[in-house]
Image (cartoon, rainbow, N blue to C red):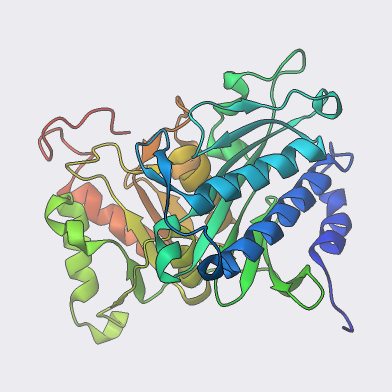
Amino acid sequence: MTGLTTLGQFIIEKQADFPYAKGELSRLLRDIGIAAKIVNREVNKAGLMDILGDAGSTNVQGESQKKLDVFANDQFISALRSGGECCIVVSEENDEYLYIDSEISKNAKYIVAMDPLDGSSNIDVNVSVGTIFSIFRRKSTEGKATLEDVLQKGVDQVAAGYVIYGSSTMLVYTTGKGVNGFTLDPSIGEFCLSHPNMTIPKDGHIYSINEGYYTHFPDGVKKYIKYCQVEDEATNRPYTSRYTGSMVADLHRNMIKGGIFIYPITAQAPNGKLRLVYECNPMAFIIEQAGGFASNGYQRILTLDVTELHQRSAIFIGSCNMVKRAEEMMACFSPQITKTSFEGVVNIQ
């Protein structure tokens, strides 16, 4: 136990990094950590309880909700409501934003956007899943927080993180001062600092994309995939293809080993599939703080305008040199999606 640093201790030690904070953000991060422990407990005993399979409902995206999706959503909302530091919660599982209207939250300054259980379709087959969260400071100073407080660009995030529920459970987060990872020690029930000052290699040898949709990809993505597969000793190609269907799991692996995760626009999803507010922006913030880069193929993810709660975006994210190379392919072979690449493509930024 000598030299062990828990998540709570670490957050308190770093509180001085926030010149305007009075401990609220620290308490908010601890609340998220508590909810993550509860979700981890249920994920780990999923096969022993009646929490596998569909919940019989769909979310705003029209996707079938799993029982654990609903459970995780409820746990994080409950923790944020009880903590009193959050005024609005945005979740993949809720059509509209949830205003926290309670006595202890009346002066709350923070907004949390989250995907409570990323990759939940993997639960039934015992593959890693995760939680993604993003934290903003509300801009308005009077009255209730509004939708305008929620629709902030990714560069305005004050913190972001993810939890991966795998062979071990890790919480990784940033407050704009680098990235640190904490592994849950089940013997003491605490997240302990295990990966200080995480950085992603500038280059990698892993590419993560659902190649089942290859025929529907833009030419720039197809050319990049072929580039990854060509043998070239000087650049350590061919690269290895690894894709699990969980953004958190794929990006966590690439964060450690170096690689790129791609979810492009397709003919069926002309604006992309992943959600900007609670998937792309938080993961982009984390990866950039670790020395990587995130793009929609043409523009930095964190600078994209946010106009809707459940806005979608393409994403190319991971090792800096790999993402830049993919951007070059997009610029050359799919220049800003010329409106002829796909029928009906609109509003590509």
Name above or below for residue 348 compared with residue 234: above
Name above or below for residue 23 compared with residue 344: below
Q: Residue at x 87, y 63 (%)?
A: 9
Residue 182, x across and y down, in percent: 70, 68
Q: Specify the quadrant that holds the N terminus.
A: bottom right
Viewer-side residue, 57 vs 231: 57
Viewer-side residue, 349 vs 101: 101
The answer to whether residue 206 is left or right of residue 68 is left
Can residue 65 be seen here? The reply is: yes
- Residue furthest toward the top? 143
Residue 77, x across and y down, in percent: 66, 40
Residue 142, x across and y down, in percent: 77, 13
Residue 96, x across and y down, in percent: 52, 26
Q: Residue at x 17, y 61 (%)?
A: 223
User: Number of marks in the image?
Assistant: 0
Viewer-side residue, 63 vs 169: 63
Q: Specify the quadrant that holds the C terminus.
A: top left
Name above or below for residue 78 compared with residue 100: below
Name above or below for residue 26 compared with residue 5: above
Q: Residue at x 59, y 50 (%)?
A: 72
